[in-house]
Amino acid sequence: QVQLVESGGGLVQAGGSLRLSCVASASKYPINAMGWYRQAPGKERELVAIIHIGGTTRYADSVVGRFTISRENAKNTVHLQMNGLKPEDTALYYCNGRTAWGDSWGQGTQVTVSS
């Protein structure tokens, strides 16, 4: 298991920006992918963005053009730059790290966007 610690959530007005960060503890195995998921009240957890160790990225359609995921492999750190935030982006955001042995999750950081 990899321990993940998120930071950077908060309250922002619609149209504003936030930057989430997630640091992974040292892992015995390579962390092949790191990503961000979110879960709003009453909804299922959904993928927001993911970045593989080689740099390939994938985004949810709803955030394309607004969010950017980046990774510092040497520091086992992933960032999510969120611009043009909308009230529907309000959710608990979870960091995910994937190794050959499975997924690890952070505790989550709350993002609230007011209209």
Image (cartoon, helix red, strand yellow):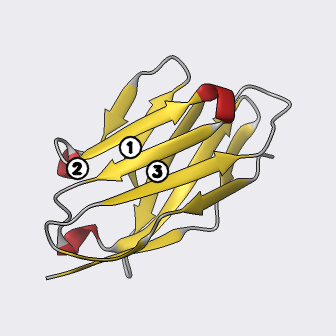
The location of residue 15, given as percent across then percent down, is 14, 66
Residue density around tag 1, few if under 14, some if 14–19, many if 20 or more, within 10 Å: many
Quadrant in the rendering for residue 50 = top left
Q: Is residue 89 above or below residue 102?
A: below
Residue projecting furthest to the right: 28
Residue density around tag 2, few if under 14, some if 14–19, many if 20 or more, within 10 Å: some
The reply to whether dot 3 and dot 1 touch (C-beta < 8 Å) is yes
Q: Amino acid at mark 2?
A: Val
The location of residue 112, given as percent across then percent down, is 33, 78
Q: Earlier in the sequence, mark 1 or mark 2?
A: 1
The location of residue 45, given as percent across then percent down, is 44, 63
Q: Amino acid at mark 1?
A: Ala
The location of residue 44, given as percent across then percent down, is 41, 67
Q: Is residue 79 above or below residue 70?
A: below
Q: Which mark is residue 49?
A: 1
- Res 70 visible: yes
Q: Earlier in the sequence, mark 3 or mark 2?
A: 3
The reply to whether dot 1 and dot 2 touch (C-beta < 8 Å) is yes
Residue projecting furthest to the top: 54
Instruction: Give the structural element (helix, strand or loop) at label 1.
Output: strand
Quadrant in the rendering for residue 75 = top right
Read off the residue under disc 2.
63
Q: Nearer the viewer, residue 36 or 41?
A: 36
Read off the residue under disc 3.
36
Q: Earlier in the sequence, mark 3 or mark 1?
A: 3
Separation of marks 1 and 2 at Cα, in angstroms? 8 Å
Q: Quadrant of the C terminus?
A: bottom left
Q: Nearer the viewer, residue 88 or 73?
A: 73
Separation of marks 3 and 1 at Cα, in angstroms? 5 Å
The reply to whether dot 3 and dot 2 touch (C-beta < 8 Å) is no
Q: Is residue 61 above or below residue 10?
A: above
| Residue at the (56%, 23%) spot, across then down | 53
